[in-house]
Image (tube, grey):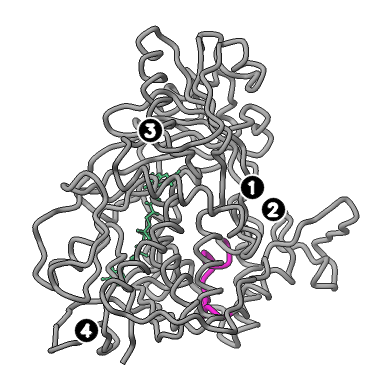
Amino acid sequence: MYDICIIGAGVVGTNIARELSKYQIRVCLVEKEEDVSCGASKANSGIVHGGYSDEPGTLKAELCVKGNRMYEQLNKELNFGYRETGSVVLAFRDEDMKTLEKLYQYGIKNGVGGLAIIDGEKVRELEPYVSKEVKAALYCRNAGVTSPYEFVIALAENAITNGVELKLNTAVVGIEKVEDYFKVITNKGEIQTQYIINAAGIYCDKISSLIGIDDFHIIPRRGQYVLLDKEQNYLANSVIFQVPTELGKGILVTTTYHGNLMVGPNAEEISDKDDVGTTEDVLENIVKTARMSVPDFDMKQAITSFAGNRPISSKKDWIIEESRVAGFINLIGIDSPGLTASPAIALKVAGLLKQAGLELRNKKDFMAYRKPIIQVKDKNFKGDINSTNPDEHIICRCEQVTETEIIDALHRNIAIKSIDAIKRRTRAGMGKCQSGFCRSRVKEIIARELHIPVEEVTQRGKDSPGLPERAKRGKYIKL
Ligand SMILES: Cc1cc2nc3c(=O)[nH]c(=O)nc-3n(C[C@H](O)[C@H](O)[C@H](O)COP(=O)(O)OP(=O)(O)OC[C@H]3O[C@@H](n4cnc5c(N)ncnc54)[C@H](O)[C@@H]3O)c2cc1C
């Protein structure tokens, strides 16, 4: 019997798991995929938002600001990668000025520090490559960039270190309330638990309906991106937004935590929750729109495209509550800024559990620290693709990933064995050649370290579905 069963190991579920691992309770974290961070948490903009975009008084606004303030400390403890870069929202037309003023007022009411409306000249001082058409911007000092999937991995590893049981490849297919506890039915058998936390992201409606709560629905809203080579990152110092549209924060141009230039996302409602393909017409439009902010990025330096799906709820604001089924805590429609807010969401859920009667007594031996996987390579680093020293043996040339880093990732407390799982932890395959050089080398190391035949190593888990349909590079780089 667990005290708590968390369904979904995205950034929300793993933040909750890590928070609850501070207490003397039995927690399991159930995930249908082969690894953590396989949903929206791996395919987003990676922005730690300042907190001025959402209307004051909403849960989104409150938890975004609180979550933002927790990142620096969390990164010190968990080493996943976070950098405060600031952000600007650009205004091109007179009517955009009204939007800047509205966002500024939202920010002040939401308690966001470091906000100012700056004129075009000042914008170009901060961001020399923005368009000459820019008239002004809302500057926010407290925004930043993070590596979203590394954040989830770090949270999960640390939660496991502190006693949480992670069950991968385990899909929840049914829930039964039995007197004062639940039976969670999965493809791997039954789990008994006092409380359930529904953190299933885009599938939160499906999980909720298993217990008879179906008064809302979730629509997937896809966002596509183009990722460019690190050579292009001089074009954006901070996160460069345009004024938001009805569908969201609009197209941004940013340098990612690991230094690529990234443009996107659009916002398109689709019917298939799992469709994370990219399409040429949308990417063309994204590039065109992004050029209004930063005209001169070079699409010959585009290395890949990808997409993620936001869970848009018919309830509009997030719902985080103990539902009418006692002991079942629902998290509904955690779309953007869910990544930013996730540490604060975890605190809120812990509060709800206390209110529901769960005793949360601190563990004396809670271990807050988690060692990074990726090692910083300074100018003294001697990497060589033929080295026999694993610390210097370069497996991925583009991202300078060593054999030691891959071995480290494989022997941590999350049992992984796919090429993509290694990619998310070490960056092997994330670079310009998109794994053309390192794929077979990574495969061999996985097989050797896990004592399995090379043929058993898959790209992404047991059934290894093919890569999502992606726009052909040749077409969209013409722009
Ligand atoms: C295009 C895009 C851009 C975004 N940009 C930002 C940004 O810059 N900043 C920001 O703050 N937020 C951003 N967001 C929002 C943010 O990514 C999400 O709010 C956040 O990732 C949601 O995390 P989650 O854990 O709720 O969902 P997910 O990461 O989707 O995790 C849910 C998990 O539940 C699992 N699951 C589902 N059903 C079952 C089942 N039956 N059994 C077991 N497991 C199950 C899934 O496999 C998945 O791993 C963006 C989102 C998108 C899509």
Pointer 3 local density, CA inside 10 Å: few below 14, some 14–19, many at least 20: some
Residue at the image position 80 percent from the left and 72 percent from the top:
390
The amino acid at mark 4 is Ile
Disc 2 crowd rating (10 Å Cα; few below 14, some 14-19, many 20+) is: some
Are dots 4 and 3 in contact, CB under 8 Å? no
Residue corresponding to mark 2: 399
Residue 162 horizontal side relative to residue 99, left or right:
right
Determine whether the residue tagged by mark 4 lies in a helix, strand or loop.
strand
Q: Nearer the viewer, residue 24 or 372?
A: 24
Count neighbours of disc 1 (C-alpha within 10 A) and say few if under 14, some if 14 to 19, many if 20 or more.
Answer: some
| Residues at marks 4 and 1, CA–CA distance in whole angstroms | 40 Å
**Image quadrant in which you'd find residue 212:** bottom left
State which quadrant residue 288 falls in: top left
The residue singled out by tag 4 in the image is 185
Assign ligand 1 to one image quadrant: bottom left
Asked if the residue at tag 3 contacts the one at tag 2, i.e. Cβ–Cβ closer than 8 Å, the answer is no
